[in-house]
């Protein structure tokens, strides 16, 4: 999955940011990332609920219950995790599921958490199962069973840990084992953004990027960004590049339209890969149904990428449907003009 500017390193401890300095560091990493709920348009239902749970935890002076965010890439799972820590006024620590290798890695991190801190595990579906088991009692009872010693001398010691909040993020909820999933008291699915929320995101980003863009232009871009803030931010940076290159001081709707054409984004906000998927189902497989494996090998693309990155939006827009025998174009999908980018 491509992350334009929110890369994780291979180290299990990516960052350890405590208290107010966290915002400073975060700002330098990705200046378009909102730092508070007030700066975060969209996902209203999720935000309203989270505000209540956070306020309650603060009043009780207890750790917030564990939270899992799921949904397609680029919709704000990582961003919201950071915002939760910041709104709780709690220390934040981030690790990535696949980077965990030995149970001791995770046990060490959990053991060193300060009370009420937020431990964010990105790609939590990729935490190996033998490590995942450490989390069960840590999440439920705030204790861990640790094996000390080796061979005949090995014994299990129960170790208390500070009450903390685990925030997990995943693009594939179905890959999470039920014992782990059951331990998340707060489960939130992030949805593709409406054009209104996307416009607000783009207004904010354009200000931060010092780009003068009019409302109609913002709206057009909002409607072509696949309901995905990461894509919107990527596109607005490219538009800024073209504006600077062409000495355009104010970005108009026509300018956005021309630029999107250069970027091969069509009138429906579809990119070349989206169109390739749709034309493959349409022409090679007669509109489907066709298995995802078959589409993946025809396009020489990774199945997971198709399922995680491309398909959710095509299904969301009602262009593709998923059935027991595979993927099919809907009548709406079949009637799209896929041959041109205009
Ligand atoms: N509601 C929002 N308002 C403004 N910007 C947002 C919003 N949501 C996400 N973004 C921006 O979009 C980008 C992607 O967000 P984020 O990294 O949180 O997505 P994600 O769901 O964690 O994606 P992935 O599944 O790929 O890890 C970030 O740069 C962030 O700044
Ligand atoms: Mg993320």
Image (tube, grey):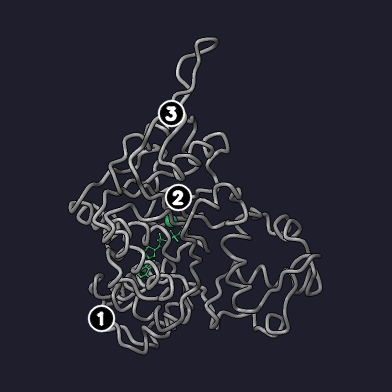
Q: For this view, does 249 lie left or right of residue 97? A: left
Mark 2, Cα crowd under 10 Å, few <14 / some 14-19 / many 20+, is many
Q: Which of 259 and 331 is in front in this view?
A: 331
Q: For this view, does 21 lie left or right of residue 67? A: left
Residue hosting label 3:
158
Give residue 1's position: percent from left, percent from top: 51, 54
**What residue occupies the far front of the structure in this picture?**
60
Of labels 2 and 3, the one closer to you: 3
Label 2, secondary structure: give it.
Answer: strand
Label 1, secondary structure: give it.
Answer: loop
Residue drawn at (50%, 48%) of the image: 124
Measured in 3D between alpha carbons, the distance from the residue under mark 2 to the one under mark 1, in whole angstroms, is 35 Å
Sequence-first disc among 2 and 3: 2
Mark 3, Cα crowd under 10 Å, few <14 / some 14-19 / many 20+, is few
Q: Quadrant of the C terminus?
A: bottom right
Residue drawn at (68%, 80%) of the image: 333
Mark 1, Cα crowd under 10 Å, few <14 / some 14-19 / many 20+, is some
Q: Residue 212 carries which label?
A: 1
Q: For this view, does 178 lie left or right of residue 208? A: right
Sequence-first disc among 3 and 1: 3
Give residue 27's position: percent from left, percent from top: 24, 58
Task: Identify the image quadrant of residue 26.
Answer: bottom left
Label 3, secondary structure: give it.
Answer: strand
């Amino acid at each position: 999955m491509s992350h334009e500017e929110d890369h994780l390193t291979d180290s299990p401890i990516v960052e350890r940011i405590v208290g107010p300095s966290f915002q400073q560091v975060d700002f330098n990493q990705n200046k378009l990332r909102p730092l508070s709920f007030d700066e975060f348009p969209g996902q209203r239902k999720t935000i309203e609920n989270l505000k209540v749970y956070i306020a309650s935890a603060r009043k009780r002076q207890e750790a917030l219950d564990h939270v899992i965010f799921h949904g397609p890439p680029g919709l704000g799972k990582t961003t919201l995790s950071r915002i939760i820590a910041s709104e709780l006024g709690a220390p934040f620590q981030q690790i990535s599921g696949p980077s965990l290798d030995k149970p001791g890695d995770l046990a060490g991190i959990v053991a060193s958490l300060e009370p009420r801190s937020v431990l964010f595990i990105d790609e939590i579906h990729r935490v190996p199962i033998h490590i995942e088991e450490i989390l069960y009692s840590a999440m439920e009872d705030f204790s861990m069973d640790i094996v000390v010693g080796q061979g005949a001398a090995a014994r299990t010691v129960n170790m208390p840990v500070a009450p903390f909040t685990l925030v997990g993020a995943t693009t594939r909820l179905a890959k999470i084992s039920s014992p782990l999933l059951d331990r998340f008291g707060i489960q939130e699915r992030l949805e593709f953004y409406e054009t209104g929320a996307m416009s607000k995101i783009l207004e904010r980003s354009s200000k931060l990027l010092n780009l003068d863009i009019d409302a109609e232009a913002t709206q057009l871009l909002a409607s072509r960004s696949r309901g995905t803030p990461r894509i919107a931010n990527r596109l607005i940076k490219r538009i800024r590049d073209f504006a600077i290159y062409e000495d355009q001081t104010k970005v108009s709707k026509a300018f956005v339209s021309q630029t999107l054409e250069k970027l091969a984004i069509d009138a429906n906000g579809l990119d070349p890969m989206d169109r390739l998927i749709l034309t493959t189902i349409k022409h090679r497989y007669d509109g489907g149904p066709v298995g995802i494996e078959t589409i993946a090998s025809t396009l020489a693309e990774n199945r997971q990428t198709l399922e995680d990155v491309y398909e959710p939006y095509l299904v969301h827009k009602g262009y593709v449907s998923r059935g027991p025998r595979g993927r099919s174009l809907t009548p709406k999908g079949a009637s799209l003009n896929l041959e041109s980018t205009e």
